[in-house]
Image (cartoon, helix red, strand yellow):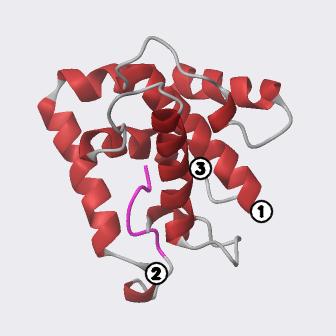
Amino acid sequence: MFLHDRCRKLRDFQAGDAVMWLRAVDRSLLLQGWQDVAFINPANVVFVYMLVRELVDGEETKEAELQAAVLTCLYLSYSYMGNEISYPLKPFLVEDSKDKFWDRCLLIVNRLSSNMLRINAEPGFFTEIFTELKACGMNSASSNPNGNLPCGAA
């Protein structure tokens, strides 16, 4: 719901689209043998959300832009939280330019490295992000007639 509410310029985007992107990558890595268990679980989704809420500003005008941003956040989440030393880049790339992908990675790391460490070190910080994400699921654009962002307005 967070992305659907934030990305109002994307007329045809549905909240389930982002879920599909995440699950497709997770399934691909499972089938290719890069991981033994699924990565997508509540704790890792909280981590992905923490990155996405900072990178996605709602100015995306194409769904492909949003997908690239979300999958970049997912890649960094795998790299930071995943069980493997490395992961293949291909499942996370949806654009031709690897440079854009790596630029987004650097932007996220430079902006959020302290929070990426903090979320695992401070249970209270994790709970704060989790509570915010949970509120995103409980609020939606239909229950928010003023057009204010119900969550993630960091």
Question: Is the residue under label 3 in contact with that under label 1 (CB below 8 Å)?
Answer: no
Q: Residue at x 47, y 42 (%)?
A: 26
Which is more toward the observer, 154 or 38?
Answer: 38
Residue 44, located in which quarter of the rendered image?
top left
Task: Measuring from the top left, give residue 31's x and y in whole percent.
Answer: 50, 37
Q: CA distance from mark 2 to mark 3?
A: 17 Å
- Residue labelled with disc 2: 141
Three-letter amino acid code at the position of disc 3: Val
Question: Is the residue under label 2 in contact with that under label 1 (CB below 8 Å)?
Answer: no
Give the SS element for disc 2.
helix
Task: Measuring from the top left, give residue 104's x and y in whole percent.
Answer: 67, 30
Q: Earlier in the sequence, mark 2 or mark 3?
A: 3
Give the SS element for disc 3.
loop
Which is more toward the observer, 54 or 97?
Answer: 97
Residue 118, located in which quarter of the rendered image?
top left
Disc number at residue 61? 1
- Residue labelled with disc 3: 56
Q: Residue at x 70, y 71 (%)?
A: 10
Q: Earlier in the sequence, mark 1 or mark 2?
A: 1
Q: CA distance from mark 1 to mark 2?
A: 19 Å
Give the SS element for disc 1.
loop
Three-letter amino acid code at the position of disc 2: Ala
What residue range appears in magenta?
148-154
Task: Measuring from the top left, give residue 18's x and y in whole percent.
Answer: 54, 59
Three-letter amino acid code at the position of disc 1: Thr
Q: CA distance from mark 1 to mark 3?
A: 11 Å
Disc number at residue 18? none
| Label 2 Cα crowd, 10 Å radius (few <14 / some 14-19 / many 20+) | some
